[in-house]
């Protein structure tokens, strides 16, 4: 029987570490500030922005929100971001996705100056990740690494399989695992015989967006399974992995809710603190 990873405990420890770093910044007259831009009517996005606001308050960092109505243009957003790029009191700029459909996501994200790209989505930061340089890393994969590190697992030589190749999860996740010398395979919607890969995975990271897609027959005995998926089914949150089904075969697994989602938001503040620390 496997163990459901206690992500709450991991997050608690990470918050304690961040509190110390934030206090040290304050002693140096630096108060980290996050600027959040919300340009959509998406209800989940509002919840996510609310979660970020609460954590900023809890950790004593500044947060300001720009809630824009659907008349906002690409030019409006670009001029707002340009202003925040110049503002020395702002450390991190976050554009909550998805945007209103008429907005040009790529153009808008690329306007954020890489040094304030707290989400790590800018091509410059993604490029640095690929060449193995220290950079701002996308929050969800960064949080997954925090979880894996808390297990004290040596990733070198392990078979790591990432399902999903998005810019915000799958691709940076694969790079982070590669940087730790895992042997990494990326699977996606066009992968044939997915099970052949998943059954060989010592570490399986699933970021597909399909409820309970991964079941027992697809995983390796003793594997560590990280479920990134968040799916709303009949008002409840479900992961991409059928946790109860898989639990008896694997060594470790994260749950949904109570898993990766908790580390994502803490990783955001960790990125903000890392950026602010460059001010001193
Ligand atoms: P996405 O839609 O951009 O990407 C999904 C990926 O899954 C694609 O690369 C696609 O190729 C792959 N895929 C789809 N069907 C597949 C199949 N049948 N077999 C193999 N691969 C398949 O999604 P995303 O933004 O990467 O998010 C993935 C999931 O993770 C979603 O459920 C999302 O809500 C969740 N998510 C969670 C967090 C968190 O903090 N926990 C953060 C971001 C995303």
Image: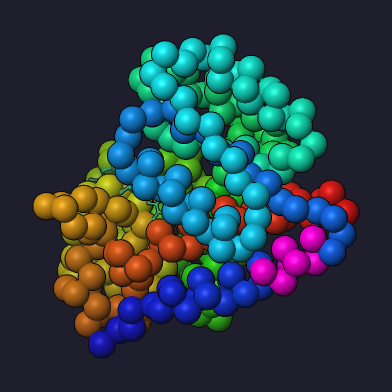
- For the point 69% across and 30% down, the residue is 84
Identify the residue at the far bottom of this view.
1
Q: Which residues are magenta?
A: 19-26
Count of labels in the image: 0
Vertical comparison of 269 with 250: above or below: above
Q: Is residue 227 left or right of residue 126?
A: left
Which residue sits furthest left? Answer: 234
Taking the image as shown, residue 153 lies to the left or right of residue 197, namely: right
Residue 43 visible in rendering: yes
**Residue visible at 66% across and 42% down in the picture:** 92
Residue 226, percent across and down?
38, 65
| Near-viewer residue (19 or 171) | 19
Q: Nearer the viewer, residue 29 or 170?
A: 29
Q: Main secondary structure of the magenta part?
A: helix
Residue 182 lies, with reference to residue 190, above or below; the image says: below
The reply to whether the magenta stretch includes residue 238 is no
């Amino acid at each position: 029987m496997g163990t459901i990873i206690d992500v709450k405990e991991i997050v608690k420890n990470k918050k304690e570490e961040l509190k110390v770093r934030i206090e040290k910044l304050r002693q140096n007259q630096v108060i980290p500030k996050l600027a959040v831009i919300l340009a959509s009517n998406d209800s989940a996005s509002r919840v996510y922005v609310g979660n970020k606001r609460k954590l900023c308050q809890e950790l004593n960092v500044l947060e300001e929100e720009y809630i824009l109505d659907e008349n906002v243009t690409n030019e409006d957003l670009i001029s707002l971001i340009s202003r925040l790029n110049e503002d020395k009191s702002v450390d991190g700029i976050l554009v909550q996705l998805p945007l209103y459909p008429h907005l040009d996501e790529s153009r808008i994200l690329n306007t954020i100056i890489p040094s304030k790209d707290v989400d790590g989505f800018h091509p410059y930061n993604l490029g640095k990740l690929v060449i193995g340089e220290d950079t701002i890393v996308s929050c969800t994969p960064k949080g997954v690494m925090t979880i894996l590190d808390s297990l004290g697992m040596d990733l070198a030589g392990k078979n790591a399989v990432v399902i999903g190749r998005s810019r915000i999860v799958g691709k940076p996740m694969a790079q982070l695992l590669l940087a730790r010398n895992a042997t990494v395979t990326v699977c996606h919607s066009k992968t044939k015989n997915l099970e052949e890969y998943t059954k060989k995975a010592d570490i399986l990271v699933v970021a597909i967006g399909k409820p309970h897609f991964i079941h027992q027959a697809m995983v390796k005995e003793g594997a560590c399974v990280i479920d990134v998926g968040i799916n709303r089914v009949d008002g409840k949150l479900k992961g991409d992995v059928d946790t109860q089904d898989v639990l008896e075969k694997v060594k470790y697994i994260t749950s949904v809710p109570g898993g990766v989602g908790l580390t994502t938001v803490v990783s955001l503040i960790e990125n903000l603190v890392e950026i602010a620390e460059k001010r001193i």
